[in-house]
Image (cartoon, rainbow, N blue to C red):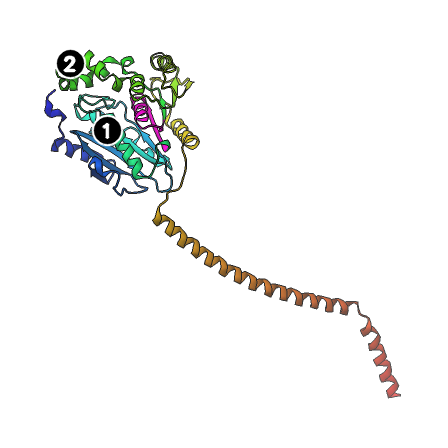
Amino acid sequence: MSESKFKVTEEILEKARKSMHKLVDNIISLDLNEIEDYEFPQDEPFGLEIIYKEALFYLIIKFSSTNKNIICFSPGAFRRDSVSSTGEIIEPPHFVRWSWYRFFDESVITSADPTIFWDDEIKIGWMIGDKNHWYLETMSIIISKLAKNQNVINDNILFYGSSGGGFVSVCLATLIKNSKVLVNNSQFSLSNYWKSLVNYPIELMAHTFDGLSIKEIKEKIAYRMDAIKLFEKENYAPYITYYVNVASESDTANHSIKLIEDHYAQNQFQGLNIVYYKEDKSIPHHPLQTKLTLDLIRLYAKNNLYNSKPQNKKTIINEEKYVKKLEKELNKTKKELNKTKKEFNKTKKENKNLKNIKREMQNSKSWKITRPLRKLMNMLKRK
């Protein structure tokens, strides 16, 4: 593959931006060092474009103004022949679960793999990068800067992915210390995955390694291809929650059992929660059904992330004004209520007096006596 394939050309940019505009209206282009101080939109999706070291990073983001947690969806495999609702081929960047921001109160970040711009045939890249640039490491820097921009600590960041996206999520959670990770049918060592898919991106960037063989390249970047090697390199491993379909023999034997064997003995081991389930489907490796996946992520976020309201001065001022207005209306209502209560008590007293008078009149027999006496007196007078 020629060196020019790695350069971000105007043609690539034009196609990428056109593809992005089909997903979101607003696309923000920034340098890496501008992210932390930029004023991003709140409560609406937007695209982010970062060009760094001749690699093109795209993200779709929705920041929440009321929930200071972030859920990150990582890219996995994709089909190059996928078409839109209008029948057009979907050009890169490709996203997995990009529209899921609709289902969460938390902020949501979905990323695309820059590797997809290398070649029209590449289907998965694990953000593997080239000799001088590990794309996944740069993505971890971008996400860290976005979190700082929103005043979100690492403890409140959750990475989710399945299959290749699970591998990327585990690696990102390793680089962004104290963040959380939840995966489904994930890979942990690419050496246990389909060799043809793994070798293809390495063959594409092999020329950047000064003539090294595929085997030598794999050894040189082993930490990019094996989570266990990355744990050793970083001297850190995240606590992993891992759902595995036992109907998928490959996931069970080549990844979950292998992870247990390799990881428990590591000094970096912090914890591992593997949930085995059985779901019979035509391709057992595929993730859990969407509704169940959403429920799992929501439950995990509720139990493992923190929900704190943003300390935004403008928001606080608006709240104070609103509260004062309510207090004023409440005091006015209280005065009116007291006035009505007094009038009611007065009327009640008057009604009581009237009832007493009526009762006395009803019980009195004086009218029965005086009337015949007056009649008798009148009769006497006439005589």
In the image, 196 versus 305, the foreground residue is: 305
Which residue type does callout 2 highlight? Leu
Residue 126, image quadrant: top left
At 24% from the left and 40% from the top, the residue drawn is 26
In the picture of the structure, the residue carrying the numbered disc 2 is: 212
Look at the image and tell me in which quarter the C terminus lies: bottom right
At 27% from the left and 35% from the top, the residue drawn is 145
Q: Where is residue 322 drawn, in percent x and y?
A: 41, 53
Question: In the rendered view, does 21 fall on the left or right side of 298?
Answer: left
Question: Where does the magenta region start and end?
Answer: 156-180
Q: Where is residue 142 drawn, in percent x and y?
A: 25, 32
Residue 107, image quadrant: top left
**What is the number of the mark on residue 138?**
1
**Which of the two discs, 1 and 2, labels the residue nearer the N terminus?**
1
SS assignment at label 1: helix
Q: Where is residue 172 drawn, in percent x and y?
A: 30, 26
In the image, 164 versus 369, the foreground residue is: 164
Answer whether residue 303 is magenta in the image.
no
Q: Is residue 29 above or below residue 336?
A: above
In the image, 158 versus 201, the foreground residue is: 158
Crowding around mark 1 (Cα neighbors within 10 Å: few <14, some 14 to 19, many 20+) is: some
Residue 48, image quadrant: top left
